[in-house]
């Protein structure tokens, strides 16, 4: 298996929302913000090439929503799924499987685009099967008021209608070298993929641990629907990751791509920080 870091673009978001009840006086020690309290984030994803599969995890914001919507996210930079996948030596048509960790717009919006002729949503990966947990699908189809603004049916329902979407019913093996964990603190049925790579476990932590600076147990984003559950899941996972020498791959951390872990007097924290390419 070969893993590549690919990118669906960069954007900005309110720093306070990303760290929940943790005051700015603490998180600003590590993460700079602008005059509007916005911090830089990214949509860093994984491309996994096996003997017979080419797997992508998540698809970023996409471009289907209107200008008013995107004014809230201040996108910047030139990186896209298409050009970073091409840089890795593949095309969108080569992708066989797309694992959607969940159906919030910034993770699945880029899975479909509007056809220039018909105006209908079509998959950006034309030959791929898409996967999401059944728990998350049920959640997204009947969203609670807290999350309703994060779900746009045009981002995922056409995949179901076309028969391209399959449900993951439980945690476990996806294919050789790929295991799926399922967490419920951020949202119901969040998939956390784990890859066996170069003799190590590489875990795509996604919105489970949004950035390296969310490693401390109380540093839970305001977006999480069950923050106490998020804290419990994180504490349990960090013990698992430390015991297994896992590498954490961060999806939204603009500044840090991967890290290993060590136990410190303040809890489990980053040890070595590096890029996936340098693993």
Image (spheres, helix red, strand yellow):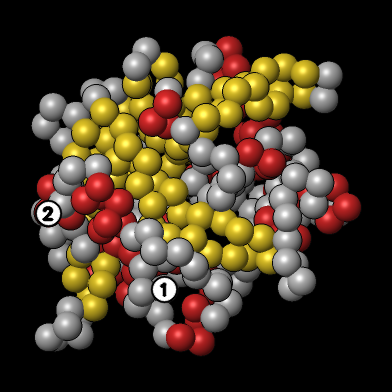
User: In the image, what residue occupies the spot 68% across and 56% down?
Assistant: 18
Callout 2: 10 Å neighbours few (<14), some, many (20+)? few
Horizontal side of 90 relative to 21 (left or right) equals left
Callout 1: 10 Å neighbours few (<14), some, many (20+)? some
For the question of whether residue 168 can be seen, the reply is no
Q: Which residue is mark 1?
A: 152
Q: Is residue 156 above or below residue 188?
A: below
Horizontal side of 268 relative to 147 (left or right) equals right
Q: Is residue 160 above or below residue 270?
A: below
User: In the image, what residue occupies the spot 73% across and 55% down?
Assistant: 32
User: In the image, what residue occupies the spot 15% across and 65% down?
Assistant: 162
Q: Which residue is mark 2?
A: 93
Horizontal side of 192 relative to 33 (left or right) equals left
Horizontal side of 199 relative to 82 (left or right) equals right
| Mark 1: secondary structure | loop
Residue 216 position in % (x across, y down): 74, 35
User: In the image, what residue occupies the spot 58% across and 77% down?
Assistant: 72
Q: Is residue 242 above or below residue 37?
A: above
Q: Quadrant of residue 77?
A: bottom left
Identify the mark nearer the N-term, 1 or 2.
Answer: 2
For the question of whether residue 63 can be seen, the reply is yes
Q: Is residue 259 above or below residue 192?
A: above
């Amino acid at each position: 298996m070969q893993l590549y870091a690919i990118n669906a673009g960069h954007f900005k978001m309110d720093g306070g929302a990303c760290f929940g009840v943790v005051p700015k006086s603490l998180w600003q020690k590590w993460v700079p913000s602008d005059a509007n309290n916005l911090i830089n984030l990214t949509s860093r994803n994984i491309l996994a090439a096996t003997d017979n599969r080419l797997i992508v995890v998540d698809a970023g914001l996409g471009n289907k929503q209107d200008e008013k919507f995107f004014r809230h996210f201040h996108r910047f930079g030139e990186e896209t799924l298409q050009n970073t996948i091409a840089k890795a030596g593949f095309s969108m048509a080569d992708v066989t499987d797309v694992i959607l960790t969940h159906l919030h717009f910034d993770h699945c919006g880029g899975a479909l685009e509007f056809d220039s002729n018909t105006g209908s949503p079509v998959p950006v990966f034309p030959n791929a099967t898409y996967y999401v947990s059944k728990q998350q699908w049920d959640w997204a189809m009947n969203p609670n008021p807290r999350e309703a603004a994060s779900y746009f049916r045009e981002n995922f329902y056409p995949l179901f209608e076309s028969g391209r979407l399959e449900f993951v019913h439980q945690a476990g093996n996806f294919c050789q070298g790929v295991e799926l964990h399922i967490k419920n603190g951020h949202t119901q049925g969040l998939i956390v993929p784990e890859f066996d790579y170069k003799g190590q476990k590489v875990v795509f932590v996604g919105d489970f641990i949004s950035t390296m600076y969310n490693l401390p147990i109380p540093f839970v984003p305001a977006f999480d629907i069950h923050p106490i559950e998020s804290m419990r899941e994180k504490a349990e996972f960090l013990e698992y990751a430390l015991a297994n020498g896992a590498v954490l791959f961060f999806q939204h951390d603009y500044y840090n791509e991967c890290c290993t872990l060590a136990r410190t007097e303040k809890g489990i924290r980053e040890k070595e920080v590096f890029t996936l390419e340098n693993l």
